[in-house]
C-alpha cells in the first residue's frame, strides 16, 4: 500500500518563499507529483519528479530524494493567487502500468498580504 | 480541445436512487481515471481505463459502483442505491503516457439527501 504525509496547513506572506514537505511509504515507487487545487476547482498538475534532484518551473520547484522517501514543493515570490491546497502524489507503476496516483491529504497554503 | 469535461456539475439525489455521471476526456488521451474527493481530503482512486478496458478498480469500491468507457472515448460512472456516504466530489482525469501529469475535470458534486 501507499501512504503520504504532508502538513495540513501552512501560512506565509506575499513575496516570501514557502516549502511544503511530503514523505511517503510505498510498495512500489515510480515518481512524485504535485498538484494545486483552488477552492471549488479541479486539481491542476504542477510538477513531476521521477529521479532525484530539483525540477524548476518558473516560481515553483520540486525536489525528490528517493533514498529518504521525501520530496518538497518550493514556491517563491508568493502571490495571493497561490492560496490553495497542494497535494503530493505517488505513482504506483506496479499496478498494471496504469500510472495510478495515490494522493496525500493536502496542504492548505494561506498567503497573507 | 478544451480539456476534460464532466456532466453534471452538481447532482442532488435522494437516498436509494441511482445516479450516472459522464466524463469526456482529452481526445488524444488513452488513459482515463475516476477519483472521489471529500472535503479536506486528497482525491481517492476509484477506477482506471486504458482505452476501453477497465484495468483497475479500487478494492474500496462497493458493487454499487460501476464504470464504463465504450469505444475508449467518454466514460460513465454509475452509483446504484445511493447512500449518504456517497456524497462527495467525483473527479475524472485523463492522461497520455506515464509522466505523472493528469488533466482533471471540474468534477461532479454529488449530494445524497
Image (cartoon, helix red, strand yellow):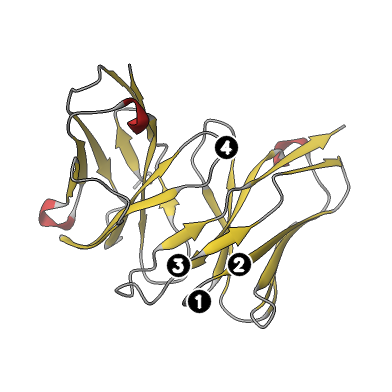
The chain carrying label 1 is A
Q: What element carries label 3?
A: loop
Residue A56 image position (x, y, % from top left): 70, 68
Residue A97 image position (x, y, % from top left): 33, 75
Q: Is the Cβ of the residue at disc 4 closer than 8 Å to that at disc 1?
A: no
Which labelled disc corresponds to residue A1? 3
Q: Distance between the residues labelled 4 and 3?
A: 21 Å
Q: Residue tagged by mark 2?
A: A24
Please rate how many residues cluster around mark 1, counting C-alpha atoms within 10 Å: few if below 14, some from 14 to 19, many from 20.
some
On screen, residue B53 versus residue B100, left or right, reads left
Q: In this view, does A49 lie above or below B105?
A: below
Which residue is pictured at 34% across the width and 72% down the height?
A95
Residue furthest to the left: B71
Which labelled disc corresponds to residue B40? 4
Which residue is pictured at 19% across the width and 52% down the height?
B73
Residue B17 image position (x, y, % from top left): 18, 23
Please rate how many residues cluster around mark 3, counting C-alpha atoms within 10 Å: few if below 14, some from 14 to 19, many from 20.
few
Quadrant for residue B107, please give it: top left
Could you say which is closer to the camera, residue B71 or residue A104? Answer: A104
Could you say which is closer to the camera, residue A77 or residue A72? Answer: A72
Q: Residue tagged by mark 1?
A: A29
**Quadrant location of the C terminus of chain B?**
top left
Q: Distance between the residues labelled 3 and 2?
A: 11 Å
Q: Distance between the residues labelled 1 and 2?
A: 10 Å
Q: Is the Cβ of the residue at disc 1 closer than 8 Å to that at disc 2?
A: yes
Amino acid at each position: 500500500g501507499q501512504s503520504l504525509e504532508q502538513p495540513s496547513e501552512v501560512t506565509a506572506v506575499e513575496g516570501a518563499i514557502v516549502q511544503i514537505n511530503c514523505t511517503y511509504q510505498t510498495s512500489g515507487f515510480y515518481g512524485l507529483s504535485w498538484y494545486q487545487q483552488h477552492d471549488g476547482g479541479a486539481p491542476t498538475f504542477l510538477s513531476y519528479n521521477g529521479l532525484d534532484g530539483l525540477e524548476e518551473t518558473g516560481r515553483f520547484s520540486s525536489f525528490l530524494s528517493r533514498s529518504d522517501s521525501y520530496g518538497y514543493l518550493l514556491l517563491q515570490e508568493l502571490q495571493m493567487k497561490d492560496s490553495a491546497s497542494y497535494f503530493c502524489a505517488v505513482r504506483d507503476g506496479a499496478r498494471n502500468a496504469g500510472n495510478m496516483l495515490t494522493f496525500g491529504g493536502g496542504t492548505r497554503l494561506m498567503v497573507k498580504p | 480541445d478544451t480539456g476534460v469535461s464532466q456532466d453534471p456539475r452538481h447532482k442532488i439525489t435522494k437516498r436509494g436512487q441511482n445516479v450516472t455521471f459522464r466524463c469526456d476526456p482529452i481526445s488524444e488521451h488513452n488513459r482515463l481515471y475516476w477519483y472521489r474527493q471529500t472535503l479536506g481530503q486528497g482525491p481517492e482512486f476509484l477506477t482506471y481505463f486504458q482505452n476501453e478496458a477497465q484495468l483497475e478498480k479500487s478494492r474500496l469500491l462497493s458493487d454499487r459502483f460501476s464504470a464504463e468507457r465504450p469505444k475508449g472515448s467518454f466514460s460513465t460512472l454509475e452509483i446504484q442505491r445511493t447512500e449518504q456516504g456517497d456524497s462527495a466530489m467525483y473527479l475524472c482525469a485523463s492522461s497520455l503516457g506515464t509522466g505523472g501529469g493528469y488533466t482533471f475535470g471540474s468534477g461532479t458534486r454529488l449530494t445524497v439527501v
